[in-house]
Structure formats: C-alpha cells, structure tokens
Image: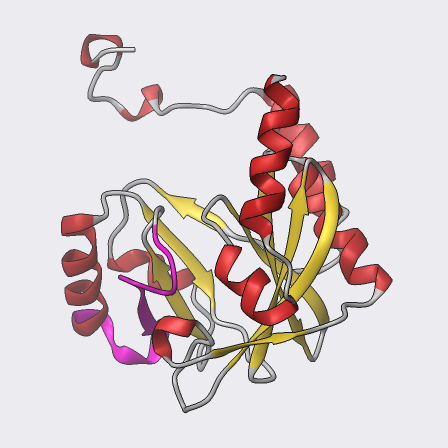
Amino acid sequence: NSLSDFSLNKSNYLKADPLLKNEWKKRLEQLNGRLKIGFAWKGGVNFRRGLQKNDLYVLKPLFSTKARGMTVLSADHGDDNLKQALDTFQKDNPVLYIQRKIALSGRDMGLMFLGGNYLGAYARVAQNDSWNTTIHSGGKYQNVVPTDDIIAMAHEAQSLFDMDFTTVDVAETDNGAICFEVSAFGGFEGGLEGTGIDVAELYADYVLRAIS
C-alpha cells in the first residue's frame, strides 16, 4: 500500500484476484454484446488502439451534471490532436472515464426511484443540434412512459448501488435500450417539470419516515 511495496521491474504489476476475474468475466458475458464501459487510471494516446474508426467517444469527469466538462473525441482526429485533448482533460481529471457516444433519437429518459420503488420517468428532448440532450444545452423536459422492459432494466441497475433516491438514465438506440448512468445527482427538476411529480416532497417524507 505504499511505494516501497513495489519495485521498478515489470514483474510487480498489480494483478486482479483470479476468482474476481472469473466472476466479472461471467457477468460481462451475460451482457450479450451490450455496451461496456472501461476505466483508465492513467492513459495516453496509445488508448486510441481501442477506439473504433468513425465512432465518437465522450471523455467525462467522474463528478459532473448536464454534460459540463465533457469532451467529444474521435479516433480520426489523429494522434497529436488526441494527445493534446487527453493532456488538457487530464489536468483537471486524473481519472479518465471514457464512454462511446451513442446515436440517440433526439431524447433520452430519466427513470426515478425512491427506496428502490419506481416513481415515474421524464424525457430530455433536444431542441437544437447539440450532441447531448441536457437542459444545460437547450433540451426540454417532457413526460414519457417507458416500456416494462426498460423499467425492469433500470430497476436492476439502480439496485446495485443501494441509494435511497436515484435517477437512471436510459437511451433508446437502434440496438435497443441501454442504461448509461445511475445518477446520484437529483432529478427533482425533471420529475416536476416533465411529470408533475414533486420528488423533493416525496423524498423529504421518505426521510422523515426513516428517522421517526
């Protein structure tokens, strides 16, 4: 747990626990080709080898809302431009979080859960040619009724984090619906403007019941 525990030879790379490797291998295989997200704690331009030609990718701060601080990259930008973009991003974000950009239908959905129970959903609908649908970029909230399959997927996603309140972001793509975020940041405004649900009031009541 300190620098003295490691020498400079390559035989001392950190290695994952074999049992955990097998467990995660099985879990990833169950995704059946669905989107996977990877993390790089320290990276460089060599990560371009993992980018697919003509695809776009989003560099995201670990803690951000409404697409603030995000950067869109492409493998076609060239090594020099990619390196410059990565170096600039890494000055404020030592952990690189990269996500493949998905072609959306002009909207995505926020499914709200309180105490693990589904409350309802709102859509963020783009109003311009911005690459994202966030309100910060001009998007608008609307009511939406997700399918039972989408609600079940979102419920499973939020259950992994044991949060009292969360909003699960879901996008509909040509390959089906995908969950791309389980958010710890609000959803109150979207719930109220998009669905008429006063999430703040429900959350306050939930907390009062929990401590009474």
**How was this image coloured?**
secondary structure
- Residue 40, percent across and down? 36, 45
Q: Residue at x 68, y 29 (%)?
A: 22
Residues in magenta? 64-80
- Residue 199, percent across and down? 59, 51
Residue 161 visible within the image:
no
Quadrant of the drawing holding the C terminus: top right
Question: Which quadrant of the figure has residue 174?
Answer: bottom right
Asked if residue 66 is positioned above or below residue 5 in the image, the reply reads below
For this orientation, the residue located farthest to the bottom is 128
* Magenta stretch contains residue 135: no
* Magenta stretch contains residue 77: yes
Question: Which quadrant of the figure has residue 207?
Answer: top right
Question: Which quadrant of the figure has residue 54?
Answer: bottom left
Q: Residue at x 74, y 49 (%)?
A: 118
Residue 13 visible within the image:
yes
- Residue 172, percent across and down? 67, 73
For this orientation, the residue located farthest to the right is 148
